[in-house]
Amino acid sequence: MATRLTELCTILVENAHGELAAKIFTILADHGRLHLPALHQLTRIPLRRLKNAVALLLQHHILYYHASYDEEPTYFQVNWDAAYAIIRTRKIAKLIADREGEAAGRLVSNILQLGHASVGDLLDEYGLTPDSKRDSGIDVVDHHMSEEGLVNGIAKDGKLEAVDSEVTTTSEFHSLMRKLLEKGFLVKVGQRTYTAYADLTEQVKDIVIAEYFPTGKVTGPKKAPEFKARVNEQKRKWEEEDAYSSSKDDAARGTFKKSHNKRVKLNGDLPNGLHHDCAVHDVDAEYSGPKLPNDMVVRVNVTKCLLILRSQRLERMVERFLGPATAAVYSALLRSIENEGAAKIKTERDKARGDDDDDEILPTASDARVLENLDPSVDLASTLKVPASMHKLPNGTGSHRGKSHGLSSDPNEAELGIKREHQSDGEDEPPQDKKSAVFRDHNKRLDLIAMHLQALSEHPKGFCVRYIHEKTTCVDLDALANTLVNTELDIMIHARFGKVATRVVRMLREKGKLEEKQIASMSLMRIKDVRTILTELQFHGMVDVQELPKDSSRQPSRTVYLWFFDEGPVVKRFLQQTYQGMSRTLQRVRIEREGKFRAVIEKAERTDVKGREQELLSWQEKELLREWREVEEQLLVQVARMDDVVAVLRDFSGRDTSLNT
């Protein structure tokens, strides 16, 4: 494993879990798989403290373990995905909060801090058990984030912060958990969760050989394909067993109900200023649904969050090329695919399973499904050349000329100051006509969505493929991930080597291997200038050259030099440089904190000062604290931007295998 990634993950583990955990992580990263006695010998840590630290790392899934059926010791190894995912904790919590609400974001943030947690423990820590005050009807305080205290969801007494001020009952908590489980933001934790993929593969092979191949022979033209098919079938069976299913994972079928007293707001003689037959009562809704078992253990699904991050990156690309309205339609299309479970990041591990049928079928969504996931306030006609009859207001309602503001359309009456009142369009309209108007607006909005999707399919980037007659759209996510990688490489090469070098790299990527004369002819440049650019790019590892001698003498004058661009080594080089930049930035944060800001930070973090900084800190201390927060924010923003680069180059495409274990 690369040293730069090891350095970065060690810093992340140390910042999150302390020096002891970071030391254990470094030893395992350098030496590979080790059992506890060997780890104790290398780290020189007392055995009791070592076991506690290993348990902490296992709880956060930073380590895998492998326990054989015999009396052999248990071996531990590093989980690189979980170690690096520490840097995305805040990003994931914010992402889910934007998608599913503040309550879901805060719940996910707390689970991320715990690594994993059971439903019963979460209920107990949140004070939602039957014996707690919260579920017995006693009022509780508002649990929104405040400056007094609760940082990252952890309260001063060690209890987890409540999910949200609106989630106050067990039924609401179970409803929120079920929603996150069904959408894939949370996944169940089982014994196989702690096992590395290579060990799982070996276990599957042993089971298949023992059940279907008692002779032990799995090679040959007939046995090998059958053995591979059996192994893939067993893997899919285990995946289905580990996945959440409402039919088998709900502990009990019952109806949770929470009744409240009706409250009527009075405005004068009538409630809310309405007529007696239109009074509106503020009654809390009743929640019903199945209950999750208390012993179910859950954790956050980082892969699902990567899907949403990829969709957001594609949406920004569409907005840059086609505008915000088309980007909103594309976002609804991607969300439709995500909700149906058709979108996934296909890694090399999935491709090795040989699921050829899945490769041929692209995720597809209908226009009606896109309309369901589209924000009704989006003005779809703003960026399209459409007939005047199709121009609608943002909410999909139309406007009529000559009837606005209740004024008369006769100019003679306007000069005399006569204002003729017009009735609104909907006052005398029969109910059937209202339904027809809603149906027409719905169809017009579908037509506008179809026009936006057609524009997306005709774009050179190939954002989607449109089937007009079926009114469906499919998306080739693998090809779009490659487009994101190429775009990111072009941006980085342009920033380092300039516009001309970027054009040369694009040419080599599209045309393949070319000679200097061909490059000069296509780019309309002199050979001397092209040779200078190619030499610089080769020196930094961006391009390479292949020598083809014409005879056995191998003289330069009798050799053809073909220049080419190999994307794989370039991506790895940029990844290593990005890892190093993130490590240096995080180290800079620590240096700044331990420097001139150390005294004021320690004072501001005292329990008697936190939340009362304006009263207890002097003017100089408040200025230093403000300066420290600005410095920290600037450095962490740079880390987040570099993490976006890592996500594009490594995670979205699924082709990088450096983190697979």
Image (cartoon, grey):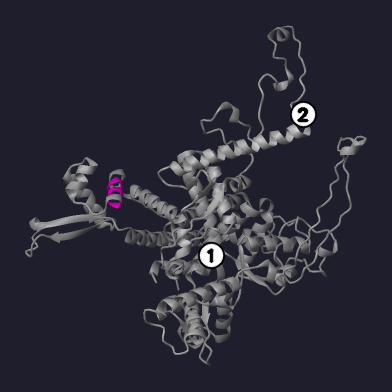
Q: Would residue 86 appear left or right of 146 to someone viewing this image?
A: left
- Asked if the residue at tag 1 contacts the one at tag 2, i.e. Cβ–Cβ closer than 8 Å, the answer is no
Q: In this figure, which residue is indicated by the disc labeled 2?
A: 429
Measured along the vertical axis of the image, is residue 424 above or below residue 280? above
Q: Residue furthest left?
A: 553
Bounds of the magenta segment: 502-509
Dot 1 crowding, Cα within 10 Å, few <14, some 14–19, many 20+: some
| Res. 605 image quadrant | bottom right
Work out whether residue 155 or residue 471 is closer to the camera in this orientation and state it: 471
Q: Residue at (84%, 47%) from the top-left corner? A: 282
Residues at marks 2 and 1, CA–CA distance in whole angstroms: 59 Å
401 or 271, nearer to the observer: 401
Residue 504 covered by magenta stretch: yes
Q: Position of residue 2 (x, y in %)?
A: 38, 69
Asked if one can make out residue 213 in the rendered structure from this viewpoint, the answer is yes
Location of mark 1 (residue): 86
**Front-most of 275 and 83?**
275
Res 624 visible: no
Q: Residue furthest right?
A: 269
